[in-house]
Image (spheres, helix red, strand yellow):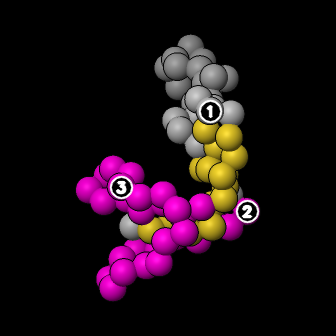
Amino acid sequence: MLIKNGTILSPATQEELHADIRIKEGLICEIGDLSPVDGEELLDASDCMIAPGLVDVHVRFRDPGQT
């Protein structure tokens, strides 16, 4: 899979990078200005932010119906 034109946010380095990401077998294998290869799934991430593991901290875990 190739994710094109995304804005990559890195909290570790406090950087914002506009680049493409190639994913193979569930792992990021390349970041940069990349071109799709034959048969590769393409996802356009224009106007999207790409960041590691964001979590909704307002989630409530309980039984349905607030019993």
Left or right of 48: which side holds 42? left
Q: Residue at x 58, y 35 (%)?
A: 54
Place residue 39 in its image quadrant.
bottom left
- Does the magenta portion include 37? yes
Dot 2 falls on a residue whose secondary structure is loop
Compared with 38, 8 (above or below) is: above
Instruction: Give the mark nearest the N terminus, 2 or 1.
Output: 1
Q: Report the span colored magenta.
A: 19-47
Q: Amino acid at mark 2?
A: Asp
Q: Amino acid at mark 1?
A: Thr
Dot 1 falls on a residue whose secondary structure is loop
Question: Disc 1 marks which residue?
Answer: 13
For the residues labelled 2 and 3, the Cα–Cα distance comes to 22 Å
Question: For mark 3, does the 10 Å Cα neighbourhood hold few (<14), some (14 to 19), or many (20 or more) residues?
Answer: few
Quadrant including the N terminus: bottom left
Q: Residue at x 40, y 74 (%)?
A: 41
Question: Disc 3 marks which residue?
Answer: 29
Question: Disc 2 marks which residue?
Answer: 47
Dot 3 falls on a residue whose secondary structure is strand
Q: Amino acid at mark 3?
A: Cys
Residue 7, image x, y percentages: 67, 55
Residue 64, image x, y percentages: 53, 25
Residue 61, image x, y percentages: 52, 19
Left or right of 51: which side holds 47? right
